Image: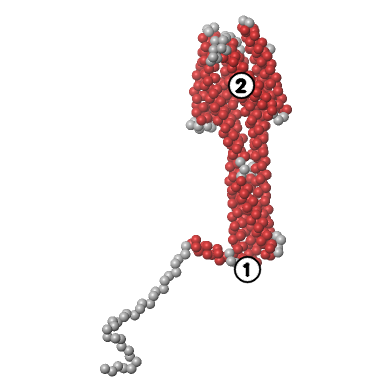
């Protein structure tokens, strides 16, 4: 068999093979948005205009963050300072006044009882005023305190027990007017309720409110470390950007970056100086105001309790003894209270930082010495069997322990008023040092950010 030329034949046993398929093109994998952004940023960073844009954006973010954090932190400090001035310290003072009113009412009730069936009008009016003041302050405190809080629970207890106390006092008066000895028992029972229920609840209320004042004071005085740190970082970045600009262009100043640096420096100085002044004033208010107020409040309360125990010593006439049955309970409590009073007055004199504060305390110390001397004389008179003479030396209008007590009480009231004024002035100065800083921080941060962007854009325009 013959074949045409140039024609090849496969072996007969080989099967026909289909042509190999042409491979299709494989599409490139799609990149995520983050990858695209990273790639663009990497590409931009390889050119000077791209680097300038990144620097401008970073500077703007830094100064804005500095201003925002400063506004946030200082707003918190300013709110805490405002709480110290307008909420927690007034509540602490009102709690102390509740305690004082209750203790003074108990003292006035005992003094009126000792006077006999015809209770002196001024003593009765003092008792009535104390009860009204305590009731008014309790209503006011209840309106600003959560009823479920520890302070709210103490206020509820006081509101429940105060009417029961006044009821016992009225029964004591009614029996005393009739000359019945049962009146003394009612008075002692009323004093027991005051000493074991009302005054401890008032003291716990005062302690809770004073603790809240301390917390607000600590919050107001806390350093804004994050704001200060961001401010230093922002200024460092601005100085670096200007140095970089100078090294690349030999131009000393970039007006935009210079303005951003100035605005950030002003804000950082304002933050540091303003907070330092506020912190110093609040510390002064605490040391020379609140600490003195706390000591003086306790001193006045102890003087009132001592006076009540002194009166009850004559009312009970040895019928109530200490737990060991050896001594007169009220005389023992009087001695304990006067010892605490002298110690607290000594501390108050050390804390007083001017003559207006130390003068009344010195008067109170002198009055306490006079009071104790007259008390010893009255006890000697009573022990000698002259009850009427002792009574006159205790509640008489002249040369009596009551006169000495009034002198001490008036001196302590004057000292408290002075220290309250000192606290208020210092705390308000502290609040004023932070005034306007949050708004100023926001404004300066925006100004610095705009100036930084303008400064960088001025440099970018040279590449167009």
Q: Position of residue 396 (x, y in %)?
A: 65, 11
Instruction: State the residue position of label 2.
Output: 302
Residue 116 in picture, x, y percent from top left: 58, 9
* Residue drawn at the location 63% of the way across and 20% of the way down: 339
Quadrant hosting residue 391: top right
Q: Residue at x 68, y 12 (%)?
A: 399
Q: Residue 199, image x and y in percent?
A: 55, 22
Give whichever of discs 1 and 2 has the lower sequence position.
2
Quarter of image, res 275: top right
Rendered residue at 68%/17% (across/down) = 369
Which residue extends farthest right?
355
Q: Are marks 1 and 2 in contact (CB under 8 Å)?
A: no
Residue 155 in the image: above or below residue 263: above
Decide if residue 4 is in sight here. Answer: yes
Whole-angstrom CA distance, mark 1 to mark 2, is 84 Å
Q: Decide if residue 127 is in sight here.
A: no
Q: Residue at x 51, y 27 (%)?
A: 154
Q: Position of residue 279 (x, y in %)?
A: 65, 39
Query: Observer-nearest residue: 370 or 3?
Result: 3
| 399 w.r.t. 1: above or below | above
- Colouring mode (rainbow / by chain / secondary structure / one colour): secondary structure
Q: Residues within 10 Å of mark 2 (few under 14, many from 20)?
A: many
Q: Which residue is mark 1?
A: 464
| The C terminus lies in quadrant | bottom right
């Amino acid at each position: 068999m013959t074949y045409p030329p140039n024609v090849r034949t496969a072996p007969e046993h080989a099967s026909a093979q289909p042509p190999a398929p042409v491979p299709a093109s494989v599409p490139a994998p799609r990149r995520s948005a983050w990858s695209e952004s990273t790639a663009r940023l990497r590409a931009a960073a390889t050119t000077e205009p791209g680097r300038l844009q990144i620097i401008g954006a970073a500077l703007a973010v830094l100064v804005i963050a500095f201003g925002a954090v400063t506004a946030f932190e200082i707003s918190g400090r300013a709110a805490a300072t405002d709480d110290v001035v307008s909420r927690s310290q007034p509540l602490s003072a009102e709690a102390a006044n509740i305690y004082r009113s209750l203790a003074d009412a108990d003292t006035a009730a005992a003094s009126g009882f000792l006077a006999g069936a015809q209770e002196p009008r001024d003593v009765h009016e003092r008792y009535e005023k104390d009860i009204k003041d305590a009731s008014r302050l309790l209503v006011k405190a209840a309106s600003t305190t959560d009823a479920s809080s520890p302070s709210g629970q103490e206020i509820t207890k006081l509101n429940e027990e105060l009417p029961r106390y006044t009821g016992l006092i009225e029964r004591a008066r009614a029996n005393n007017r009739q000359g019945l000895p049962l009146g003394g028992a009612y008075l002692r029972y009323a004093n027991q309720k005051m000493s074991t229920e009302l005054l401890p609840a008032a003291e716990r209320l005062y302690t809770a409110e004073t603790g809240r004042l301390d917390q607000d004071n600590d919050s107001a005085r806390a350093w804004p470390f994050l704001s200060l740190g961001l401010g230093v970082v922002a200024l460092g970045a601005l100085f670096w950007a200007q140095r970089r600009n100078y090294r690349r262009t030999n131009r000393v100043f970039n007006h935009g970056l210079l303005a951003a640096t100035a605005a950030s420096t002003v804000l950082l100085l304002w933050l540091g100086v303003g907070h330092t002044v506020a912190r110093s004033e609040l510390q002064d208010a605490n040391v020379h105001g609140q600490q003195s107020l706390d000591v003086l409040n306790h001193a006045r309360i102890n003087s009132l309790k001592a006076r009540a125990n002194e009166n009850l010593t004559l009312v009970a006439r040895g019928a109530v003894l200490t737990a060991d049955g050896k001594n007169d309970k009220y005389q023992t409590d009087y001695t304990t209270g006067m010892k605490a009073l002298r110690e607290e007055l000594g501390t108050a004199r050390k804390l007083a930082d001017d003559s207006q504060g130390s003068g009344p305390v010195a008067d109170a110390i002198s009055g306490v010495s006079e009071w104790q001397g007259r008390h010893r004389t009255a006890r000697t008179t009573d022990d000698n069997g002259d009850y009427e003479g002792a009574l006159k030396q205790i509640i008489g209008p002249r040369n009596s322990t009551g006169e000495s007590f009034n002198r001490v009480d008036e001196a302590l009231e004057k000292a408290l008023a002075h220290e309250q004024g000192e606290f208020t002035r210092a705390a308000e100065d502290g609040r004023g040092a932070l005034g306007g800083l949050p708004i100023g921080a926001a404004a300066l941060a925006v100004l610095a950010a705009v100036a930084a962007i303008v400064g960088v854009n001025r440099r970018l325009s040279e590449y167009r």
